[in-house]
Image (cartoon, rainbow, N blue to C red):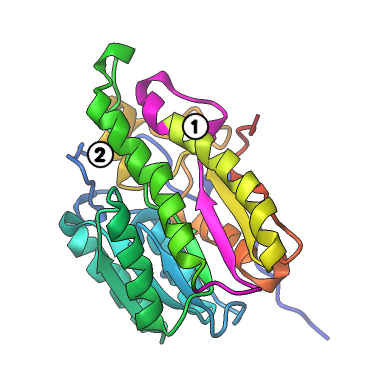
Amino acid sequence: MATQTTPHVDPRHAGKKPPFDEKTQPHPGLEAAMRTKPDFGEETYVGFGRLAGRRALITGGDSGIGRAVALAFAREGADVAFTYLPAEKPDADETLRVVEAAGRKAIAIEADLSDPATCERVVRDAAHGLGGLDLLVNNAAFQGKAVQSFEELDPERVTHTFQVNILAMFHLVRAALTHLAAGGSVINVASIQAYQPSAAILDYAATKGAIVSFTKGLAKELIGRGIRVNCVAPGPVWTPIIPQSFDAEKVRQDGKDNPMERPAQPAELAPAFVFLASDEGRFVNGEILGVTGGLPLG
């Protein structure tokens, strides 16, 4: 019997490479305002029902990795709730569109996750709207502008970074445990910054290191309830956080020093989340899955 084959793709040339003709943006960066649009998989991702009937909450699902995961989960059969900041509504509307186009229920929840009470409300609203909760993806993160010296790191900014990037995870997981049952899954998002921290975004890097420890410790705790906890650690990814955080030249050359000589596209991260969320990953727990283009974790 003849079989169809897919042509091999050279991974070095599978995504857009620098230099990028991109302008810088204020916080929060918007995908809608980017000249070089990220690829979140709308034209390429094919689902196979691996998450059929699952109900997922994805924080920061309006753009970038979050949108790519929302699309992939929907095409795998999951209903999706996601959070976004008020200024990110144009991007959130696009995520709603692609999830609904996949034939799944989509719920957009406006939320500032630096507030513990808001984290609890987010989980409550998601579980109510979806009829329960099976998957929690802690993706939302704050990354401030790159600084030139340690003294430039404002204490208020550092506090806010920790509130959004790691403390919110504690509050979200605590609230989600009311709804998650055996077979459920929590997926956190760290970064290569946890292992190769940049001084220019030291506050962000420190939170990503904390997420690695949080993941490993929580995995030991929750497996006793049949709930797996894992983490994806991306390398450079072409998302709105890049033009939001760095100067024009850094944005222009984003990913150039990666072994792949380019940043990842969000669509290239989504399959890692699907694997960890699905039954295919049921013996995977407490792992940090690097999707870095060859940059080592450790």
Rendering quarter of residue 91: bottom left
> Contact, CB < 8 Å: mark 1 with mark 2?
no
Q: Nearer the viewer, residue 257 or 213?
A: 213
Is the residue marked by circle 2 packed among few (<14), some (14-19), or many (20+) residues within 10 Å? many
Using residue 185 as the reference point, say whether residue 32 is left or right of it: left
Q: Quadrant of the N terminus?
A: bottom right
Amino acid type at circle 2 is: Gln
Q: CA distance from mark 1 to mark 2?
A: 17 Å
Residue 122 placement: quadrant: bottom left
Write down the residue under mark 1: 193
**Magenta-highlighted residues:** 179-204
User: Callout 1 environment at 10 Å: few (<14), some (14 to 19), or many (20+)?
Assistant: many
- Could you tell me residue 171's position as x and y percent? 41, 54
Q: Quadrant of residue 213?
A: top right
Tag on residue 274? none
Considering the image in quadrants, where does the C terminus appear?
A: top right
Q: Is residue 158 left or right of residue 103?
A: left
Which amino acid does the dot numbered 1 rest on?
Answer: Gln
Seen at 69% across and 52% down, the residue is 220
Q: Residue at x 40, y 77 (%)?
A: 127
**As displayed, is residue 19 above or below residue 272?**
above
- Dot 2 falls on a residue whose secondary structure is helix
Q: Residue at x 43, y 64 (%)?
A: 175
Which residue is label 2 attached to?
A: 244
Q: Could you tell me which secondary element the residue under label 1 belongs to?
A: helix
Q: Position of residue 66 (x, y in %)?
A: 40, 59
Q: Is residue 182 magenta?
A: yes
The residue positioned 54% from the left and 78% from the top of the image is 76
The answer to whether one can see residue 261 in this image is: no
Viewer-closest of 10 and 76: 76
Question: Residue 295 appears at what percent x and percent y?
Answer: 60, 33
